[in-house]
Amino acid sequence: MGILSDGGVIVVSSQSALPSSLVAADDEPWFAKPWQAQALAIADSLMANGVFSASIWSETLGQTLEQSKAQGNADDQENYYRCVLTALEALLAKRASIDLGDLDEVCRTLGIESDTHGRASEAR
C-alpha cells in the first residue's frame, strides 16, 4: 500500500482476478506468469489514476529496456517483465512517494519473496 500525492491510497492485492487464458494471435500466451499481467495492470491503473502519464511510462520503460540490453541481459519475455517491474518501481518511488522499503514490506505481506537480485519473485 502506498500514498499518492493527492492523499489517495494504492492497494495491491495478490488475489486480483486474472483471466485464465490470454493468448496472442500466434497461440503463444501473452503472459507466462500471472505476475506479468498484474504488473502491466498496475501500471495501467496508475496511469488511469494520473500517477504518471502514458508518455512518462513509455519513456521510463524504454530507458529501462535499453539499460538492460546494454548490460547484456537476454532479449526475452522474462527479462521484459523484469524491466516492467524495474520501471514501475522507479516511477512509484518518484511519482507516488512510495519508499522502496515500503514496497518490499507490501511484497512480504502479499507473500512475494525477493530473489538474489532484489526483485520480487513468485513465492510458489
Image (spheres, helix red, strand yellow):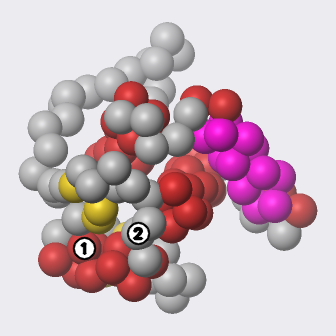
Q: Is residue 32 visible?
A: no
- Give the residue pinned by disc 1: 106
What residue is rendered at 26% in x and 27% in y?
21
Residue extending farthest to the front is: 6
Residue extending farthest to the bottom is: 116
Q: Where does the image place residue 6, in percent across and percent down from the top left?
A: 33, 50
What is the span of residues highlighted in magenta in the rendered image? Answer: 56-68
Q: Is residue 118 magenta?
A: no
Q: Secondary structure at mark 2?
A: loop
Q: Kindly identify the amino acid type of the residue bearing the numbered disc 1.
A: Val
Residue extending farthest to the right is: 70
- Of 30 and 91, nearer the camera is 91
- Left/right placement of residue 122 relative to residue 117 reads left
Q: Is residue 62 magenta?
A: yes
Q: Kindly identify the amino acid type of the residue bearing the numbered disc 2.
A: Ile
Q: Quadrant of the C terminus?
A: bottom left
Q: Quadrant of the N terminus?
A: bottom left
Q: Which mark is residue 98?
A: 2
